[in-house]
Each structure stands twice: as structure tokens, then as C-alpha cells.
């Protein structure tokens, strides 16, 4: 009888594992950056599209997740030190030198985005010229401008938050704000109630790419997440529509 019970326990354990029902406690490293509707960390609570997608993944695979939020540069250090299981958002082009000594596994794209320059409507299409003052958020790297920054034709000013960045453009202290276009337009429309204050200038350098989830410690979870992206594509698209995270990128 005892042998039979042990056999049954092992059998059920194997079945549950094969079905992906063995729960893991996963720690997700996220940014403190105000980046709503993509994500934001406010009063100890991680919110937005990213939270809903990761929570949906966890619920479908029997995992429990906790979110640990850090400033962008600190998050990278914590991640590379192995203090979190996964990182979101991530991209293979970000901090590639710092990651070179680590085997980082990236998921398939979660959501597409444009990082570009928003300007006052009157300045759209004017180009960069000999001197251009570009505003960014601290920790963000305006990859599209690196050559021009190195050549001295673009000067970068960092800001602690999006409100400060927008006000720099509005006051004329910088000519453009480099940011996620969908997030910036949401902030102008829903938070500042100034939807026409700035526009995306596609004639200026910009990047079209996608956010992924990544891991050094748990490549198996990334593989499982990729399967989730395929099997739950309709639900994920509904979340994209709800949060308008891909608005204006086509």
C-alpha cells in the first residue's frame, strides 16, 4: 500500500509539472519610472499594461509574482547581480556592454513602441540644425542621437519625471523631448490635459522596437512566457487596446 501511495504521488507530481501547474514564486524587477499606461510604480503598487500582462501569465501558469521596483540604472545592477528572477521591460540593445558577461535570454516581443522626439507644433519639421537641445528622463539613453551628441551638435538635459520634461519643451529650454511616443501622448492628453501641446516629429531620429521580458536565472520561465504570448494573443491584444500602448505607432 505504501509503495502504491508513493507511486501515485510521484505520478501526480509528474503530471502537474508537465501541465505547467507547479507554482513558482517569481520576483520581477521593474522600473520606478512613471511610464503609464505602459507601467508605473506608485505608492508601492505596480500598475498598467505590463502588470496586467505579467499577472495574466502568472495566473495561467500557476505562479505567484512579486514586483521589486528600482530606478533604471539601479535595476540593471540588481538584475545583473541575480537579485531578481526576471526584468521588464528589456531589450537586447539596452546596456549591451554591461550584459556581455551574462547569458541573458529575451522573450518574444510583448509590445511595440516608438522612442522619438516630441516638439512644439510650430517646430515640427525644422530639423536639428547646428545646435539642438534635447530633453530626456534620467537613465534613458537617446540612442538615435549618440553620434550627434558626440559631435557636439546635440546637448542633452536630463529630467527626473515626464512633467518636468514636458515643461522644458513648453518653456523653450529644450527644443525636443525624447521619450516613448504613446506614453508621452497619453500623459499630455489624460494627465496634463494639453493634448495639442506637442507632436511627434517623425523627421527627427527615432527608434521603432519592442519591449521584452528577460532573465538570466530563469530561461525556462522565458520559454513558458513565449508560449503564453502565442496562446493568449487575443487577451493581450485586448489589453493593448484598453491601455492604448501602441497608439500612434503605425
Image: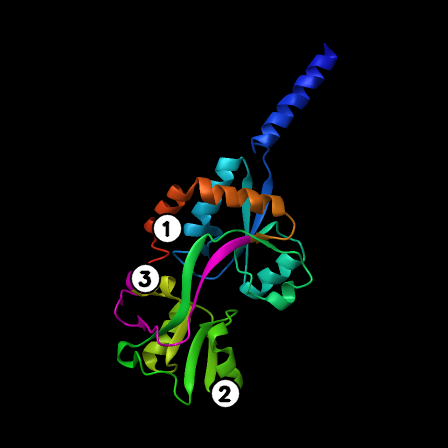
Q: Quadrant of residue 175?
A: bottom left
Q: Which of 67 and 62 lies nearest the eye of the viewer?
A: 62
* Location of residue 204 by image quarter: bottom left
Q: Secondary structure at mark 1?
A: helix
Q: Answer with mark 1 or mark 2, whichever residue precedes in sequence.
A: 2
Q: Locate residue 88 relative to residue 250 in the image: left or right.
A: right
Magenta residues, start to end: 189-213
- Residue 27 lies, in percent from the top left, at 58, 47
Residue at x-position 37% and y-position 50%: 240
| 193 lies left or right of 38 | left
Measuring from the top left, give residue 53's x and y in whole percent.
45, 46
Label 2 with label 3: CB-CB less than 8 Å: no
Q: Residue at x 61, y 44 (%)?
A: 220
Query: Label 2 belongs to which residue?
Result: 152
Residue at mark 1: 240
Q: Identify the secondary structure beneath mark 3.
A: loop
Amino acid at each position: 500500500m505504501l509503495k502504491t501511495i508513493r507511486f501515485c504521488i510521484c505520478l501526480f507530481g509528474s503530471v502537474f509539472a508537465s501541465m505547467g501547474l507547479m507554482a513558482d514564486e517569481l520576483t520581477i524587477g521593474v522600473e520606478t519610472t512613471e511610464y503609464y499606461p505602459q507601467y508605473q510604480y506608485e505608492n508601492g503598487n505596480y500598475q498598467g499594461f505590463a502588470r496586467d500582462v505579467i499577472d495574466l501569465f502568472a495566473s495561467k501558469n500557476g505562479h505567484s509574482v512579486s514586483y521589486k521596483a528600482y530606478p533604471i540604472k539601479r535595476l540593471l545592477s540588481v538584475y545583473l547581480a541575480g537579485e531578481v528572477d526576471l526584468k521588464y521591460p528589456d531589450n537586447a540593445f539596452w546596456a549591451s556592454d554591461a550584459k556581455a558577461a551574462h547569458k541573458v535570454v529575451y522573450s518574444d516581443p510583448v509590445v511595440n513602441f516608438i522612442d522619438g522626439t516630441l516638439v512644439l507644433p510650430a517646430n515640427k519639421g525644422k530639423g536639428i540644425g547646428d545646435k539642438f537641445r534635447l530633453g530626456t528622463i534620467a537613465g534613458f539613453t537617446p540612442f538615435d542621437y549618440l553620434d550627434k551628441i558626440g559631435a557636439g551638435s546635440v546637448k542633452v538635459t536630463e529630467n527626473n519625471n515626464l512633467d518636468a520634461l514636458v515643461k522644458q519643451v513648453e518653456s523653450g529650454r529644450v527644443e525636443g523631448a525624447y521619450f516613448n511616443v504613446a506614453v508621452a501622448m497619453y500623459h499630455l492628453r489624460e494627465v496634463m490635459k494639453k493634448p495639442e501641446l506637442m507632436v511627434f516629429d517623425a523627421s527627427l531620429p527615432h527608434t521603432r522596437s519592442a519591449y521584452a521580458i528577460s532573465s538570466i536565472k530563469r530561461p525556462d520561465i522565458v520559454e513558458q512566457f513565449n508560449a503564453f504570448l502565442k496562446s493568449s494573443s487575443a487577451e493581450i491584444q485586448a489589453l493593448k487596446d484598453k491601455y492604448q500602448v501602441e497608439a500612434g505607432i503605425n
